[in-house]
Amino acid sequence: MRALPGVEHAALASQIPLAGSVDRYGVVAQDKPLPNPELAPSADRYVVSSDFGETMRTPLRRGHFFVPADFADSAAKVAVVSRLLATEIWPGEDAIGKRIQLGGPTEPWRTVVGVVGDIHHQSLDAAGTGQFYVPEREWQWSDNGMTLLVRVAGDPAAFAPTIRAAAAAVDPTQRRVAMILFSAFALFALVLAAGGVYGMLASSVAERTREIGVRCALGATPGRILRMFVSQGVQLVAIGALLGVLGAFVLTRFLRTLLFEVQPMDPVTLVLVGAMLGAVALAACVIPAVRAIRIHPVSALKSE
């Protein structure tokens, strides 16, 4: 990402401000022993790459954000804390050089190398909370996902296609699992919808066997009865299709971030799915109706 023209900074982070996630850890200071570890102040956890501070323009108050020298000794661990957290743990003291422990008594001690400005993590009007930042290469557990942050010179929306293409070029299979799961659930939903449409219409026609017998006894031709049921079924399908398209128009915009090179209101998909459900509905009307009109009117009138 950093090599792309127009990109100023790029970083990775386990979470970002105002994204709705909450991931807090207790922070134990080595020089401030507590009778009970549960009394330790908690702070928002940020596992980040080195360029996070510049990418997010997080103001640096003291010390530095992560630099290559911090990783020269693989046994030495580092961390950066927010001003609020530093003030809470070491009021009136300099936090630089202090050691903290995150995640439990068996985890390594980390040296504070920087103090940064406070951020609003949960909402703009909520009370401030402390944060700590740990290099992603030094965090003791793997994160299931990381957020890519890119700062560009210009309109960010204009860079979005280039950034997506660059990410896909690095790992073309990154979306494969999500695509397979998404396709499988979509196919399952389509089968359920088709089965539901067929079952509802077929049951409706089958329940009208006595009516078909009466109509045949009064002189109605099989063709006329068949056209009547198909016409009624088509009307129901048309109403359902209209409601479905309107619902898709409203809801598919929420899927925009999950789609790549596919528009949420893809006309080909809507036409194909609509045609398939229409064919299922037509079969649901025709097949039971054909069975019914083949029954002798007397037998149809005797049916329960």
Image (cartoon, rainbow, N blue to C red):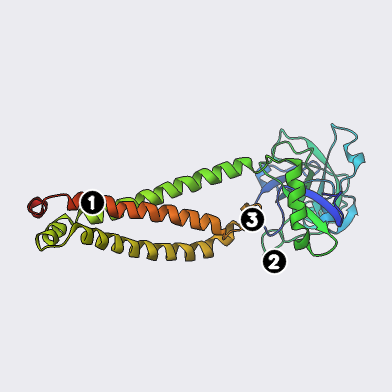
Residue beneath the point at 73% across and 51% down: 164
Q: Is residue 136 left or right of residue 187?
A: right
Q: For mark 3, give the secondary structure.
A: helix
Q: Which disc is residue 257 wearing?
A: 3
Query: Residue tagged by mark 2?
Result: 124
Q: Identify the residue at image location x=9%, y=50%.
A: 299
Give neighbour class at mark 2: few <14, some 14-19, many 20+ (Cα, 10 Å). few
Gap in Å between the C-alphas at discs 2 and 3? 24 Å
Q: Tag 3 or tag 1, which sits nearer the N-term?
A: 3
Residue at mark 1 to residue at mark 3: CA–CA distance: 47 Å
Using the image as rendered, state which of residue 57 and residue 43 is in the foreground: 57
Task: Identify the residue at image location x=77%, y=52%.
Answer: 163
Query: CA–CA distance between discs 1 and 2?
Result: 65 Å
Q: Which residue is mark 1?
A: 290
* Kind of residue at disc 1: Val
| Disc nearest the viewer among 1 and 3 | 1
Q: Secondary structure at mark 1?
A: helix
In the orientation shown, which residue stands out farthest toward the bottom?
Answer: 125
> Looking at the picture, how far across and down is residue 213, in whole percent?
12, 57
